[in-house]
Amino acid sequence: MSTPERIVLASANPKKADELRAILSASGLDVELLGRPDDVAEVVEDAPDFVGNARLKAVALAGATGEWALADDSGLEVDALGGEPGVRSARFAGASADDAANVDRLLAELGRVGAVDPAERSARFRCTIVLRSPDGVELVAEGAVEGRVLDGPRGAGGFGYDPVFVPDEGDGRTFAEMTAAEKHAISHRGRALTALVARLTA
Ligand code: IMP
């Protein structure tokens, strides 16, 4: 497969796009990363799973720009909530909810189902990445990180549910208490991108 010289990033979430850029830059992949052009409309993410939503975004962006396009879809699956919020993570507390509102809703839902003990608050972040060429060549990569949801936020870094997520592989800090590099080394997004880069450079 030909290796892309330029890749357009699909993310409309600036913090997520920053993470993708940082991880890809650190990976040593020799590629120019372009932001999503303002005149490309946002895609309605109505697929039932992460890969479906990532593909919707990658196909639309590759078609609109004529460039290779990289889209990720990600979210938090909480076992006590039957896998929710999952693909609805960005809009768990409503269509225009911000991160704080989504975290509040998550904590409220866990309280509602009586998941108080840390052992009952297991969860994982998942990330699926689709890299798509203008002529339809596609690579898909996935990553996940297991952990648990705290009963209140800790830390000021990261975004989304980071302040209430403690990865099992860490030292008890939330993702929001880690440096960006520490988070990327074990995060769902870091793992998915590492797998993608390995395949691109194989
Ligand atoms: P997406 O933009 O549809 O992929 O939605 C992703 C949503 O999942 C974000 O808005 C966050 O709420 C959540 N999420 C995904 N990755 C992370 C992460 O690394 N940390 C915290 N929250 C995340």
Image (cartoon, rainbow, N blue to C red):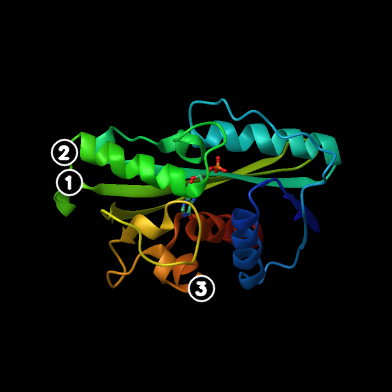
First along the sequence among labels 3 and 2: 2
Residue 50 visible in the picture: yes
Per the model, the C-alpha gap separating discs 2 and 1 is 9 Å
Q: Label 1, secondary structure: give it.
A: helix
Q: Give the mark nearest the N terminus, 2 or 1.
A: 2
Q: Provide the secondary structure element on which disc 3 rests.
A: helix
Q: Is residue 147 above or below residue 60?
A: below
Q: Nearer the viewer, mark 3 or mark 2?
A: 2
Where is mark 1, residue-wise?
Answer: 120
**Image check: 112 left or right of 106?**
left
Q: Residue at x 81, y 34 (%)?
A: 63
Mark positioned earlier in the residue sequence (3 or 1): 1
Residue at mark 3: C-beta within 8 A of ligand 1:
no
Q: Left or right of 16: which side holds 61?
A: right
Does the CB distance between marks 2 and 1 fall below 8 Å? yes
Give, as a three-letter code, the residue at label 2: Gly
- Give how far apart the Cα atoms at labels 3 and 2 are: 34 Å
Q: Which mark is residue 181?
A: 3
Residue 29 or 185: which is nearer the viewer? 185
Secondary element type, mark 2: loop
Query: Which residue is under mark 2?
Result: 114
Q: Residue at x 68, y 67 (%)?
A: 29
> Which amino acid, mark 3?
Ala
